[in-house]
Image: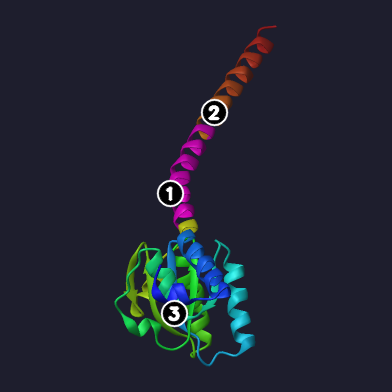
């Protein structure tokens, strides 16, 4: 247990425990400076995260608790600028969702400034947040795979249907011919 952690009161210890647990549950943490955002704008951003689904969440955190939570989870971030000024984090089950959500919000609200992103245990600077935001989500990738697999299958089914239709057409023609031949023989 770190020195700051030992001195922390019950409320801070509980906040630390919850933040550690949340960080353990997600694959990505996007760090941002939210200084200058109004309460209404912050609530709007929280709503955007809620709409994004995927367990995405926007949290305002104290830097000391954030640093301890990261270190306790085994993440050592050497860039001390991350812990200067107010910090909020966007978290999600996949790296793309929190980055996309924060990036879309930042386009409308210039006061939100990216500090960096932690993905699969690797910390990247602020410039990488937009890179992650431009990637397709896991769901979009899966949809692309399904569409790629389905397209040839759809074509195959259409060919089979056309073959059956042609076969039925030929049978109908043979039946009609037989009927005419039998009718003319009388």
Circle 1 sits in a helix, a strand or a loop, which is it? helix
**Which residue occupies the foreground of this view, 71 or 158?**
71
Q: Residue at x 44, y 79 (%)?
A: 64
Which quarter of the image is occupied by the N terminus? bottom left
- Residue in view at x 62 percent, y 80 percent: 44
Query: Crowding near pointer 3: few (<14 within 10 Å), some, many (20+)?
Result: few
Residue 106 in view, yes or no: yes
Q: Can the viewer see residue 134 in this picture?
A: no
Q: What separation in Å lies between label 1 and label 3 (alpha carbons)? A: 47 Å
Mark-to-mark CA distance, 3 and 2:
71 Å
User: Does residue 117 sit above or below 139 in this rendering?
Assistant: below
x%, y% of residue 166?
A: 53, 29
Disc 2 marks which residue?
Answer: 164
Q: Residue furthest bottom?
A: 36
Per the rendered image, the range of residues in magenta is: 141-161
Q: Chief secondary structure of the magenta span?
A: helix
Marks 2 and 1 sit apart, C-alpha to C-alpha, by 25 Å
- Quadrant location, the C terminus: top right
Along the viewing direction, whichever of 115 and 7 lies nearer the viewer: 7
x and y percentages locating residue 172 in the rendered image = 61, 23
Name the N-terminal-most of marks 2 and 1: 1
Residue that extends furthest to the left in the rendered view of this protein: 78
The residue beneath circle 1 is 148
The numbered dot on residue 64 is: 3
Question: Which of the two marks, 1 or 3, is nearer to us in this view?
Answer: 3
Residue 152 at x, y = what percent?
Answer: 43, 43
Q: Position of residue 149 (x, y in %)?
A: 44, 45
Q: Secondary structure at mark 2?
A: helix
Looking at this view, is 111 or 185 the one in front? 111
115 to the left or right of 182: left
The mark lying in front, picked from 3 and 2, is 3
């Amino acid at each position: 247990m770190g020195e700051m952690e030992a001195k922390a009161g019950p409320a801070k210890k509980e906040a630390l425990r919850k933040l550690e647990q949340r960080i353990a549950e997600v694959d990505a943490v996007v760090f941002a400076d939210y200084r200058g955002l109004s309460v209404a704008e912050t609530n709007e951003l929280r709503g955007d995260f809620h709409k994004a689904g995927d367990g995405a969440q926007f949290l305002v955190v104290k830097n000391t608790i954030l640093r301890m939570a990261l270190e306790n989870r085994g993440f050592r971030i050497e860039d001390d600028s991350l812990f200067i000024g107010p910090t909020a984090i966007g978290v999600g089950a996949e790296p793309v969702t929190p980055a996309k959500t924060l990036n879309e919000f930042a386009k409308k609200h210039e006061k939100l400034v990216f500090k960096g992103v932690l993905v699969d245990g690797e910390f990247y600077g602020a410039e990488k947040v937009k890179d992650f935001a431009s990637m397709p989500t896991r769901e979009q990738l899966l949809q692309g795979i399904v569409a790629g697999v389905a397209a040839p299958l759809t074509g195959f089914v259409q060919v089979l249907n056309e073959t059956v239709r042609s076969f039925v057409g030929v049978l109908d023609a043979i039946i009609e011919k037989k009927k005419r031949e039998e009718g003319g023989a009388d």
